[in-house]
Amino acid sequence: MSLRDRLVNPLRRVATTRAPLVTALLLIIAGLVLTFAAPASALDESDQDDPPDSEGVDLADVGVVEVLEVNGFLDPLVLDFVTREIEAAGERPETIAIVLQVNSSDMIISEAELVELAATIDESTVPVSAWVGPSSSFTGPAAQLLDWVDTVGLAQGSRVGALGPALVRKPAGQSRFDDAGPLLNKTLDGGEGFDAGIADIGPEQGSVLGQFLTQLPGVQTTIEPNDEGESTLRMVSVTRLRELPIVDQLFHTAASPPVAYLLLVIGLALLLFEFYTAGVGVAGGVAVICLFLAAYGLAVLPTRPLGLALMILAFVALAVDTQTGIPRFWVGAGLVLLMVATFLLFDGVPLSWLPVVVAFVGTALAFTSGMPSMIRSRFATPTIGREWLVGEMGTAVGGVSPEGYVEVRGAQWRAFTNRATPLDDGDSVRVLAVDGFRLEVEPEEGGARDYRDRGSH
């Protein structure tokens, strides 16, 4: 499959299931990406459907075990990947087993698609097994797929359960979960799952993937002595690890709730940064990429339109005070909207606290300190220096006692008063000196007069 196809296929999946507005946005951006992409002939990848023969090994004699990595949410890309690999494996005479190496906590595919995947596993001409490794889990409705595989292995430290309502479970008396107790809302570790009959191979026999594979039917093994004089069971059959192609992995990662959320926040923030700095376009280019991936992730995930609208409004509010160069009411309003939008963005999909804290703290720091300083530096600082400000007249903004802000020629500056003379909001002031990014000022009337008072001549 060419890289061009890998870029278009995820978008095509979204186009058949999501709103026309989102679809149009994705297709427009995809068109721009593909317009500047290399020719398809240069992007075609080598055929990876048939694994190369191991050196000196006849695969037809020893057999091949295809291990499919299934990580993260079960989304349309993972669904297509597993379905495609199972169907392809049935056409390879050397393939003797398929193993799903699973670490997944939820699914974002429809119930109908889950049923189709269960049927694909059940109808496979090659035995399909599942292994949940250490520190991994297989939870949520998708874990009901374990009813349809031939062999299940649970390693020490793995978790399985939280099945929810029955979607693709086998009838009572045939299901692996008959003796597992009420697993609707709870999970079991590897040992408990084995004792409950969910797993055929428990932690003692399947603590690592290689150990699990040696116990699958049809896998050839041999016993060899090790350096300590003991016998070791070694696998003779060849193992082939298969994972999502690189472009599919990129989109699969973007469809993760924390990643899609952070990409959206970063993209919107960088757009504002590019707008106010008018730089060479690096920030804008990164923003377009972030928003492109975020748009795909939000289209695949169960996203609430209200949450997305509030997120955009939050950055509109932040932009208001960014324009003035001083964080005031609208920065606070924007941060409140950002927090509300965060909790309304996804429907029924958990969002961990870490990306929320990172996004909120980063945005707060950027728009209360970084962006205002950058705006004042850009719009209030001439290229030949600031000495021209000395003697200029201005107006106090909000009072200066002894520090505050003044407006000089339409730009706001941090200021402090000469000899701590207090100034009220709206008082006319005269600039006496420039101290870095701060102005030393005095009242137009009644201030101290000395050699620095150039504006009085």
Image: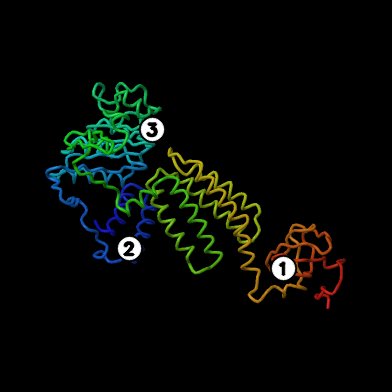
Labels 2 and 3: the sequence-earlier one: 2
Kindly identify the amino acid type of the residue bearing the numbered disc 3. Gly
Q: Quadrant of residue 440?
A: bottom right
Q: In the picture shown, does residue 421 fall above or below 355?
A: below
Residue at 24% x, 37% y: name it: 213
CA distance separating discs 2 and 3: 44 Å
Kindly identify the amino acid type of the residue bearing the numbered disc 1. Val
Q: Quadrant of residue 173?
A: top left
- Which residue matches tag 1? 408
Q: What percent of the width, then of the height, locates residue 302?
A: 40, 43
In front of the other: 218 or 320: 218
Q: What percent of the width, then of the height, locates residue 274?
A: 52, 63
Callout 3: 10 Å neighbours few (<14), some, many (20+)? some
Q: What percent of the width, then of the height, locates residue 366?
A: 58, 55
Labels 2 and 1: the sequence-earlier one: 2
- Which residue matches tag 3? 157
Q: Is residue 313 visible?
A: yes
- Which residue matches tag 2? 34
Kindly identify the amino acid type of the residue bearing the numbered disc 2. Leu
199 lies left or right of 454: left
Mark 2: which secondary structure?
helix
267 lies left or right of 394: left
Residue 40: give its label. none
130 lies left or right of 450: left
